[in-house]
Image (cartoon, grey):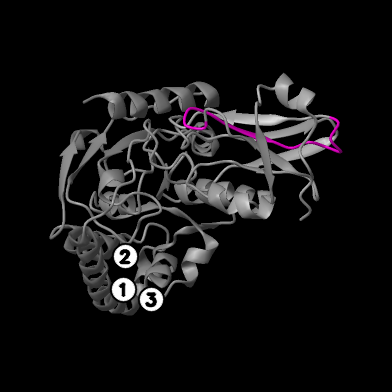
Amino acid sequence: MEVASDPPRTILHHFGFKESRSFAASSFFPSCSYKGLYTVCPPHKHAISINSTNSAQSSYLSVPRKYVSLSRHYFKPKEDLNRPYYDNRLHNGNRYVVVRSELAGTGNYDAEYPLSEHKLGSKIRGICFYAVTAFNAIFLFVLMLVAHPFVLLFDRYRRRFHHFIAKTWATFTVTPFLKIEYEGLENLPPDIPAIYISNHQSFLDIYTLFTLGRSFKFISKTSIFLYPIIGWAMFLMGTIPLKRMDSRSQLNCLKRCMYLIEKGASVFFFPEGTRSKDGKLGAFKKGAFSVSVKTKVPVVPITLKGTGKIMPAGMEGILNFGSVKVVIHKPMKGSDVDVLCNEARNIIEDELNRR
């Protein structure tokens, strides 16, 4: 990249520069790869000037275009560089692309699960957790596979025997590593069709919910069914497949849910659609509540607390110490989808905020 001579002094004085020095942009930008730092990409063959006065207190990056104008970007050294920042600007014909690091916003001050250096013990516990769950899954899957023809013959839609196997698998897996506390078990409906919903924080949520012993059908991405043992077991249990970005698949998923409810089965939804990255409750999608209104079955809100701290989303290789609390709220019905959705979300949010 060419390095131009010093820009006109009048421009430098206008922006508070007493002395300036020019250097190649290629030698400067590699130093801007700190976490959360946004990088300024100037047009090709333009010079870059930096203020050499009061450098301990402030820094100015400037890009002149044909020595006619000068632009600058200012940041404070003590500024929190982890905060999310996006900006696309057009300035004097120059296009500046400000790029946010993928790590920006991760572990920021308002996150529920801040990033930290995980101890070796958490990683070892994670390895042991997956070893135990794989060992249990192999033997229990064989039992599920042998019983599958009889399940299809006598209990085609609910498949209670398969869910009993899933409960046994989940209980044997989590018992050595964490304690689960239940509240409101009396609110679980009797053996009737219902729609269960819950907040979603962690991969551990599935294990925790299986320990309730209810034969509800989960909704899962189609790619999960390709996983050995686990995906195959989900197929035998009658888990409902879904392609997230396919509107036709979403419609078929809701039709399948209503069909299973009419046949006496229950369905489980994560209305957020995905796991929370910071522990905060996301917006609810209305599919579960639409099915409830159309089939006239109750919605059972469930609040999961603690799973996100033990195994945070995106960090499935670790397992921290901690306990999990499952709060089952009273079943609710309604004829308005929006009202039902908002009420259910408020119930779960209030429980998450309660200490």
Q: For marks 2 and 1, give the CA distance.
A: 6 Å
Q: Please state which amino acid type lies under the numbered disc 1.
A: Met
* Pointers 2 and 1 in contact (C-beta within 8 Å): yes
> Label 2 crowding class (10 Å Cα cut-off): few <14, some 14-19, many 20+?
many
* Residue 244 shows in this picture: no
Mark closer to the observer (3, 1): 1
Q: For marks 3 and 1, give the CA distance.
A: 10 Å
User: For residue 150, what is the image quadrant?
Assistant: bottom left
Q: Which of the marked residues, 3 or 1, is nearer the chain's N terminus?
A: 1
Which stretch appears magenta?
A: 55-68
Left or right relative to 118: residue 222 = right
Instruction: Locate residue 340, reporting x and y percent.
Output: 47, 25
Which residue position holds label 1?
144
Q: Residue 105: within the magenta?
A: no
The N terminus - image quarter: bottom right
The secondary structure making up most of the magenta span is loop
Mark closer to the observer (3, 2): 2
Q: Please state which amino acid type lies under the numbered disc 2.
A: His
Which residue position holds label 3?
149
Instruction: Locate residue 324, reporting x and y percent.
Output: 20, 44
